Image (cartoon, grey):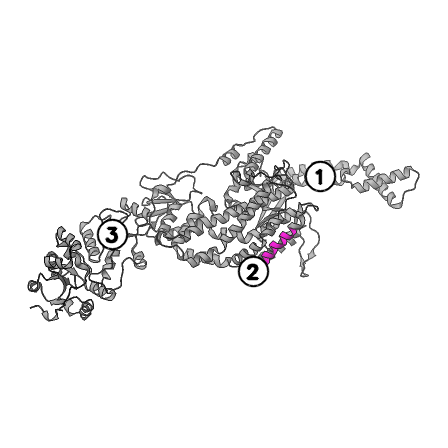
Amino acid sequence: MADNSALTSTTGSTSLADSSIFDSKVPETSKDNLFIGSTSCVEEEMPQIETRVILVQEAGKQEELIKALKEIKVPFVKMESVEEFKSLDSPEFENVFIVMDFQDSVFNELYKADCRVIGPPVVLNCAENGEPLPFSCRPLYCTSMMNLVLCFTGFRKKEELVRLVTLVHHMGGVIRKDFNSKVTHLVANCTQGEKFRVAVSLGTPIMKPEWIYKAWERRNEQDFCASVDDFRNEFKVPPFQDCILSFLGFSDEEKTNMEEMTKMQGGNSVPVGDERCTHLIVEENIVKELPFEPSKKLYVVKQEWFWGSIQMDARAGETMYLYEKANTPELKKSVSLLSLNTPNSNRKRRRLKETLAQLSREADLSPFPPQTPKSCTKSSKNSTPIPSKQSARWQVAKELYQTESNYVNILATIIQLFQVPLEEEGQRGGPILAPEEIKTIFGSIPDIFDVHTKIKDDLEDLIVNWDESKSIGDIFLKYSKDLVKIYPPFVNFFEMSKETIIKCEKQKPRFHAFLKINQAKPECGRQSLVELLIRPVQRLPSVVLLLNDLKKHTSEENPDKSTLEKAIGSLKEVMTHINEDKRKTEAQKQIFDVVYEVDGCPANLLSSHRSLVQRVETISLGEHPCDRGEQVTLFLFNDCLEIARKRHKVIGTFRSPHGQTRPPASLKHIHLMPLSQIKKVLDIRETEDCHNAFALLVRPPTEQANVLLSFQMTSEELPKENWLKMLCRHVANTICKADAENLIYTADPESFEVNTKDMDSTLSRASRAIKKTSKKVTRAFSFSKTPKRALRRALMASQSSAEGRSPSSNEKHVMSRLASTSSLAGIPSPSLVSLPAFFERRSHTLSRSTTHLI
């Protein structure tokens, strides 16, 4: 017998969510009458049906369930077997069965009889939230997948698919056969097919089948929801599931990192050429041609596919990222084709000049934007055309504008490519970074961008409407207060920003992939976010140097002279607000070592913002910066290049400021060149007559023509490729450009008459020594080198003697020296005549000794 003692009697109808049962049993005309007619009429037409809960077997022993049913005021009875159901069946009640196990025989019989069946978690949730029992045409054990719409793809076994669909229905989920925008989750058994591609494009989470099984295991947890991020992310299909990757063109360090990322993202990696490989990831900037012919099944994709898949947390479509053979840049072709193999030396010089001019035209940065700026269209009485012969002051002002424009472009790149996407709402896969992390990384970059955009616009108006009397100093004085406000907070906390980027990159693969994708874009010039963010730290010292250079080329009567001094002072005041801890003491020590080692080193090399980057030993291959064959040392600093040659004779020692005796300077200063003067870096191809050579195309602001400096590297520990990349990177930093790679070009040695043939031979060194000695002798006996003052005195002395006046003792000394020099010029000296013969004999002896050694 059924236990009717627990039947709860109610005088009125209960307010339940399953009133849809009542509606479904009423004809359409009756439904209309429900809304049109009165309530009394409805009661007369059909008696009201009340919902009753039947606790089946073990469910009737759960005190917690009984308590929950009393709270929601639902009548209930207990039932031990299915046979008792017939005695409990009544037209007055709509029965709802609570079953503890949805897999036993009782559940199966109730399900076949089309009865409403629910699980205990449904009742407990309704009691907790004060809600009525939900209506479901299917058995509902819990609500952990309520409001989820699932679609399946890639399942070949029907039994497995039926099992998964049944569990989803038991947890309140809805299944759709076709994928559409209403689907909330795609359950995939493979990473192929149209549904998978559409889900990736729409950003729909793609789940493993294990997600459903694990959710069913937690069906009795009252507050559990299968769609929460922490649980769902454990079972998302990783981007590289079913993928076997190989990497081509990457450094060992980067390749190891990418292989580790592949394993973390569900894939495997194999060496290049392995037949199991499904995707070949290519570094498109390095690899110009594949080492083998790929099969049709193999995807050959750019590295952006790899990082893009990680960022979107799903395997990206390969067709958008297919690798194509890169074409050689036109300029590189033109440089290599400019061969000067002709016996005519004049023609060689003319062709070389044309080649340098072509490179110069490509290297010169236009002082104006690609389109005519608005300021050009303004009619101004003071507007004058750019002078045909550009003054040194205009050249420096143009360089100041160019670097400012480049700097603003880099700030815009930081904001548009990095900050804005990270701050966007509704990111696929959720936010990449937390708001506080974004604020720590970027700080006051937008404010810095706004101020420098205004400075750039003012400089542009000044350059377009150029006049020597225009004040550049006023522009920086105008924004000095803004600079004081925005720069110190960013620079002082730059190390914190850097540490935050490094920490997030290690802990968050999606952020790491986000950085890699943007770093590969042309706007970034293959620079990392940290390298771009250091630009504001370097900008103000660079501006001070340019303003100092501008002041040198400003006449004393120009009113901008004093204004520039004030502007420089205001910028230095901004820099004093920056934390002194930012100064690198070790870098300062290295600069002092260079000053002590180089005789005649300029004092202005010592600067608080300057640091030594690299030292390179070379041999000069041309006429500049010194004679061919001279040993030249290049000191690369972050903003300039110190060029020094080896001293031929080192005399004495000197004391350092600390009183210690230091060794004599072994180098002689030649030139301290700002990196902004380097317009091109030429990587000379390796040939039989040319090894380890490179050249610099230089144009000082006071010169109209270009100068070519060519060198041969003798440093064995530093590869030429690394040195040139390092040099280009710091040149780009100085002129505030992101694309450092555009500064370097590969050229044939014949195009620039560069060769290293016989550079290290004994005969070649002897010939250079003879040439050098000959120059010294020529200078010693050259009248053209006689000081004008001495000649003037000698002339005065001769005039006074002609007038009958006796010369003074000093005048006699000058006349005697002049007479002795004249005697040398008029009478051949045995020692002087024998010098060429001596050089010839010495050269012949060296030649014979060289032949004997060979």
Which numbered marker is on residue 774?
A: 1
Q: Residues within 10 Å of mark 1 (few under 14, many from 20)?
A: some
Q: Could you tell me which quadrant the C terminus lies in?
A: top right
Q: Mark number for residue 150?
A: 3
Q: Residue at x 43, y 51 (%)?
A: 420
Task: In the rendered structure, find residue 579 and report the number of the disc placed on it.
Answer: 2
Res 107 quadrant in image: bottom left
Q: Do labels 2 and 3 touch, CB within 8 Å?
A: no
Kindly identify the residue that appears in the image at 24 percent across and 59 percent down: 144
* Residue 665, placed above or below residue 389: below
Which of labels 1 and 3 is toward the front?
3
- Report, in whole angstroms, how far the alpha carbon at label 1 lies from the one at label 3: 91 Å
Reading the chain from its start, which is encountered first: label 1 or label 3?
3
Left or right of 74, for residue 478: right
Residue at 34% over, 43% down: 318
Which image quarter: residue 227? bottom left
Residue 377 can be seen in this image: yes
259 part of magenta stretch? no
Q: Position of residue 558 (x, y in %)?
A: 68, 45
Q: Is residue 625 visible?
A: no
* Residue nearest the viewer, comparing 800 with 115: 115
Amino acid type at image mark 2? Asn
Magenta stretch, residue numbers: 564-581
Q: Nearer the viewer, residue 839 or 239?
A: 239
- Which is more N-terminal, label 2 or label 1? 2
Select label 1 or label 2 by which is in front: 2
Q: Is residue 740 left or right of residue 808?
A: left
Q: Secondary structure at mark 1?
A: helix
- Examine the residues drawn in magenta and state their main secondary structure: helix
- Nearest to N terminus: mark 2 or mark 3: 3
566 magenta-colored: yes
